[in-house]
Image (cartoon, rainbow, N blue to C red):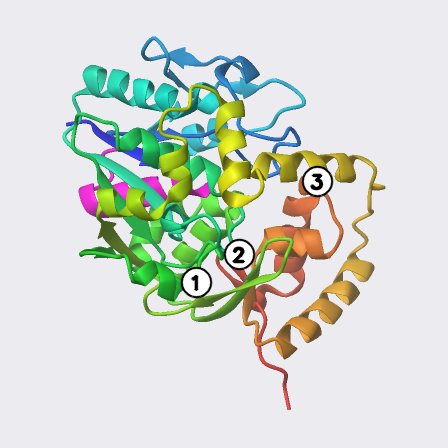
Amino acid sequence: MTRLIVAAGGGGDAVAAAMLDAALYGDDGQAVILTYAWDRLLVDPVPGPRAPSDFTGLQQLTKTVWSVPAAGRPITPAGSTLPRLAAELPHTFALIGPHHGAEGVARQLEELVALLRPTSIDLLDVGGDILARGDEPTLKSPLGDALTLAACCQMNAPVRLLVAGPGLDGELPADDVRSALGTLVHTFAPKDAEPVSGVLEWHPSEATGMLAAAARGARGVCEVRDAGLLVPLTDDSPAVHEVDMDGALHRNELARAVLSTTSLDEAEARSREVCGYSEIDYERNKAAWLKDQPAMNLDPGTVLSQLDAFENEARSRGVTHTTFRHLTEVLNLSGTQRDDLRQLLISSRPERYSAPLWSIPAATE
C-alpha cells in the first residue's frame, strides 16, 4: 500500500508531505516522499540542490533514485535537513536529482513508479508558487517547482497536484493562487500538525511552519524571509486544494520552457530567459556575500534589545508573527546560531512562542 508524494520545491514541502500523508492516510509511514536536497543557505552554505554524490550513506532504490536514511550525511561543506527528517519521521525520503533537467526527474519518477507500484501519486506544493507565470515581482524560487511540474506532466501514471496553504510562501498573493484552485481536499486541524511538531522545532521552513501554525489557529500577518515579506494567516491558510495539472502547466511558462531540459544548467538558462533570473545565481551571490561577513556574538542582552527594536518596527507594519529564520537574519546571526536564538527567546519570553512561530503582540496601552 505504498504511496508516492513528490515535494514540489523540496525543503519544507517534504515536511508538509509527511503532515498531509498522516492527515489523509494515518500514521503508518508507508509513503515515499520524493524531494530535493535543496535547503536555504542557513542550513546548506553551498548554492543549489545537492546530488547523491554530495552525501555518504545513501541507499540506492533504482538506477537513478537514492534514498536518504538517518545515517546519511552530507559531505562538508554541504548541509541537508534530510537525514534528520529520516531519523524523526517514519517515511522514506528519496532524492530528486535535477542535474539532468526535467527529463531526468521524469525518468526518476518512472523508475519509482515501476518499483513501488504506488496506490496514489501526489505532487504537493505549499503556498502555490507552482502556479506562477514567471513574471510576478514577488516570485523568488520558481525553478524547483517548475522542474517537478514539468516532470510530473510527462508521467504515464495519473498524478494529483495539491496546493496547501494558498499564498503562505509569500511568492504569490493568495488571491492569485485561489483563482486556480479546485476541489478542497482537506483543511488541516491542530491534530494534523502533531506528527511534525517536533520537526518544526528545528526545521527552517517558513511556509510549512506557517501552515502548521495556521492549522493550530494562528491568524494575523507573518513577516518572513530576508526581504521581510508580509504573509496573511487566514482561515484559508490551513486548506489543501486539488489543482488541474494541465491548467497549472498552461499557467507556468517556466515549467513549459524546461520540459525538454536534460541538465540543470539548461534549466537555469530557461529560468533566466523566462523570469529574468536564476534563483541559484541569487544563492551564489548571497553565499559570496555571507562569506565576507564577520561572525556575530549571541549576547543575550544585545539580542533582546535588538529584538525589542525589531518588534516595535514590525508592529507598526501590522505584523503579528514572524519566524525564527527571519529573526536570525534580522538580528544578523548565522544559521548555526538559530537554535541558540530560539532557546534564548523561548526561555526569556515563553508567552511569545506561538509554535512554531514567534508572536508579536499589539503594544500595551
**Mark 2, secondary structure of its residue:** loop
| Residue 143 colored in magenta in the image | no
The type of residue carrying mark 3 is Lys
**Residue 248, above or below 175:** above
Taking the spot 64% from the left edge, 28% from the top edge, the residue there is 46
Do we see residue 229 in this rendering? yes
Q: Which residue is label 2 attached to?
A: 138
Left or right position of 245 against 297? left
Q: Position of residue 79 (x, y in %)?
A: 60, 28
Mark 2 or mark 3: which is in front? 2
Taking the spot 78% from the left edge, 50% from the top edge, the residue there is 298
Q: Which residue is label 1 attached to?
A: 173
Dot 1 crowding, Cα within 10 Å, few <14, some 14–19, many 20+: many
Measured in 3D between alpha carbons, the distance from the residue under mark 1 to the one under mark 3, in whole angstroms, is 25 Å
**Mark 2 or 3 closer to N-term?**
2
**Residue 204, above or below 62:** below
Tell me, yes or no, whether the two marked residues, 1 and 3, touch with CB atoms within 8 Å.
Answer: no
| Quarter occupied by residue 230 | bottom right
**Mark 1, secondary structure of its residue:** loop
Total number of numbered discs in the rendering:
3
**Mark 1 or 3 closer to N-term?**
1
| Residue 24 colored in magenta in the image | yes
From which residue to which does the magenta span run? Answer: 9-29
Q: Quadrant of the C terminus?
A: bottom right
Q: Which residue is label 3 attached to?
A: 286
**Mark 2 or 1 closer to N-term?**
2
| Quarter occupied by residue 252 | top left
Taking the spot 78% from the left edge, 66% from the top edge, the residue there is 305
Do we see residue 11 in this rendering? no
Prevailing SS of the magenta stretch: helix
Q: Position of residue 68 (x, y in %)?
A: 43, 21
